[in-house]
Amino acid sequence: MTTLAVSENTKVTLHFALFLEDGSEIDSNFGREAATFVVGDGSLLPGFERALFGLLPGTESEFLITPENAFGQPNDNNIQVVKRNDFDAEAELECGMVFAFADAAGGEVPGVVAAFDDTEVSVDFNHPLAGRNITFRVHIHKVEAAELH
């Protein structure tokens, strides 16, 4: 039986952890059940998937994922100014607070208070990890052919 490496059309079972440049952990499933995904199903960003290509079951590895391959660079166009009175009058605003806003499709998108005064609030809709290098640590448990429908 041939051992299959991570590639297109594979189903991968793994443990993973994400870390910031200072070593602080963002997310991890080590110590919990391993995650399973099909390459290209949208579970992982493409830059994280590409880092896994060629890895075999049993492999433990660590990669530095640059912003361009992770959550992108911050975009000044993603900072919007909202009227202060659009917020609850009792809301005690602080920089860094996260609020949910409705998007054009009727869903919710998080926005972070970047600055505010008595009349306006600058809200940053960039992903909180935009512009950050991410260390991606993985342990590949199983790689199998994905069932294509």
Image: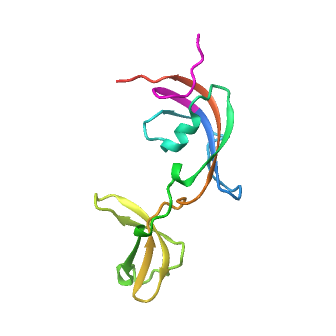
- Work out whether 82 lies above or below 141: below
Does the stretch in magenta take in 83? Answer: no
Q: Position of residue 127 (x, y in %)?
A: 48, 60
The answer to whether residue 79 of the structure is visible from this angle is: yes
The answer to whether residue 34 of the structure is visible from this angle is: no
Q: Choose between 40 and 65: the one closer to the eye.
A: 65
Q: Choose between 48 and 95: the one closer to the eye.
A: 48
Who's the residue at 55% across and 54% down the image?
67
- Work out whether 84 lies above or below 112: below
In this picture, residue 89 sits left or right of residue 64: left
Who's the residue at 59% across and 28% down the image?
54
Highlighted magenta segment, given as a residue range: 1-13
Q: Choose between 131 and 103: the one closer to the eye.
A: 131
Q: Position of residue 116 (x, y in %)?
A: 47, 83
Does the stretch in magenta take in 6? Answer: yes
The quarter holding residue 103 reads: bottom left
Q: Position of residue 115 (x, y in %)?
A: 49, 80
